[in-house]
Image (cartoon, rainbow, N blue to C red):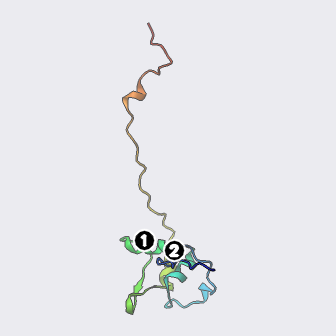
Amino acid sequence: MTTAHKRDRHGFRGVPPPPVFDFDALPDGALLNEYETAAVGRWSTNTLAAWRLRAGHGLRWVVIAGGSIRYRVSAIRAFLADAAPRKRKPAKREPRSRATDAVPATQEPAR
């Protein structure tokens, strides 16, 4: 007796394998779907979805009929050629408490 597997309702969520096509041979106007774009950049498909939600992210996309997302090859090339470092949030520092400035318990105060 075989057991039926639960259907994955979330779709593919990881990093796809390298593309099977030559990215350099594609014309600038060619459109790639999300899976193909993720394969070219070696990004997760979830990463591409998160980038679309962020305002001002450099990778541009196109919405075609039916609501499908596509990326132009020229936009991917421009994004990969941009060598701007990513913006990082400053590290949060916790204020020092006065308890750490006190004399350690192992030392006796000077008399």
Q: Horizontal and vertical percent for residue 30?
A: 51, 91
Percent x, y of residue 92: 40, 47
Residue at the far top: name it: 111
Residue 13's mark? Answer: 2
**In this rendering, is residue 10 above or below 26?**
above
- Give the residue at x 41% y 56%: 89
> How many numbered callouts?
2
Residue lying furthest front in this view? 1
Q: What residue does disc 1 label?
A: 50
Viewer-nearest of discs 1 and 2? 2
Q: Amino acid at mark 2?
A: Arg
Q: Quadrant of the N terminus?
A: bottom right
Q: Quadrant of the C terminus?
A: top left
**How many neighbours does mark 2 have within 10 angstroms: few (below 14), some (14-19), or many (20 or more)?**
few
Indicate the amino acid at tag 1. Answer: Ala
Where disc 2 sits, the SS reads: loop
